[in-house]
Amino acid sequence: MKRIAISISGKVQDVGFRYFVKSRADDLGLVGFVKNLRNGCVKVVAEGREESLKRLVDICNAGPPDSKVKRVRVRSQAAKNEFAGFEIN
């Protein structure tokens, strides 16, 4: 199992981005969370299979229809196995 932290900037709040990510993460069998940050970005922390995590990064780059993603930063982290599912915070 692997873990990544993703920071997405652009027009990513008030466009359904968190719900979009949660739905896709659930479909991919990932666990973790997605949340809005005060600086206008969206943060995702996800754990799961490497291929599923790569797909989630692609999904974050695309975003939902009303979003306008400007930048996606990905950091690898040590998996902690602390999540039971994928949540919106």
Image (tube, rainbow, N blue to C red):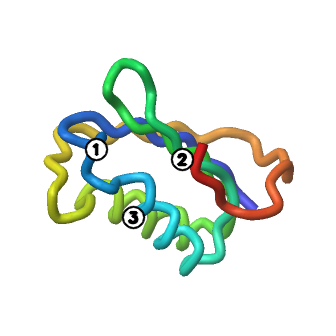
Name above or below for residue 56 compared with residue 8: below
Give the secondary structure at mark 3. helix
Nearest to the observer: residue 83 or residue 72: 83
Q: Residue farthest to the front? A: 14
Disc nearer the start of the sequence (3/1): 1
Disc nearer the start of the sequence (2/3): 3
Mark 2: few/some/many CA within 10 Å (<14, 14-19, 20+): many
- Check the picture and name the quadrant holding the N terminus: bottom right
Indicate the position of residue 40 as horizontal and vertical percent values.
Answer: 31, 26
Quote the CA–CA distance across marks 3 and 1: 12 Å
Residue underneath mark 3: 20
Could you say which disc has been placed on residue 34 in the image? 2
Q: Residue at x 54, y 71 (%)?
A: 52
Residue underneath mark 1: 14
Q: Residue at x 27, y 34 (%)?
A: 9
Nearest to the observer: residue 28 or residue 13: 13
Give the secondary structure at mark 1. loop
Q: Residue farthest to the bottom? A: 27
Quote the CA–CA distance across marks 2 and 1: 14 Å
